[in-house]
Amino acid sequence: QGQLAESGGGLVQAGGSLRLSCDASGRGVTSATMGWFRQAAGKEREFVAAITRITGSTYYADSVKGRFTISRDNTKNTVYLQMNSLKPEDTAVYYCGADPRPDALGVRPNDYVYWGQGTRVTVSS
């Protein structure tokens, strides 16, 4: 059974940066496509970024393109989300998910089977 654990959230001023980490363990996640999603209060979970296992291809939501960077270290089974130029509208709980298809770039929450518990990011204006 796969397990994911996010860390790195916190409070930051607008224009600042944070780096989120997601540690993966167990079957079904270490060879998976990994994605970051976020969910703001009262809103649905939305796609942020994804990275494939085999080719390392990436895909971003338009709202974060050019500001956020997803990367992974397969030797550590860890995925990162570097967030720069943060805006108040980036405030949300951020979740990492694992899609067992190693070379997919799914953007729907239903594409992902395993989820972490989330880490909260608050951007003040």
Image: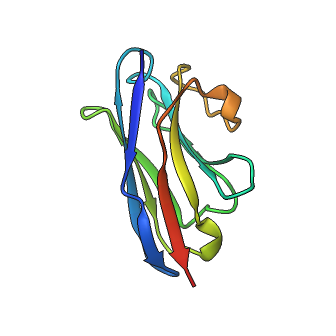
- Could you tell me which residue is drawn at 66 percent across and 58 percent down? 40
Q: Determine the residue located farthest toward the front in the rendered image.
A: 42
Task: Give residue 10's position: percent from left, percent from top.
Answer: 41, 65
- Along the horizontal axis of the image, is 80 left or right of 121? left
Q: Is residue 2 visible?
A: yes
- Could you tell me which residue is drawn at 40 percent across and 26 percent down? 3
- Along the horizontal axis of the image, is 35 left or right of 7? right
Query: In terms of image quadrants, where is residue 31?
Result: top left
- The residue nearer to you, when weighing 13 against 72, is 13
- Along the horizontal axis of the image, is 96 left or right of 64? left
Task: Give residue 68's position: percent from left, percent from top.
Answer: 51, 61
- Along the horizontal axis of the image, is 108 left or right of 119? right
Query: In terms of image quadrants, where is residue 125?
Result: bottom right
Task: Give residue 16's position: percent from left, percent from top.
Answer: 44, 78
- The residue nearer to you, when weighing 41 against 78, is 41
Task: Give residue 113's position: percent from left, percent from top.
Answer: 57, 23
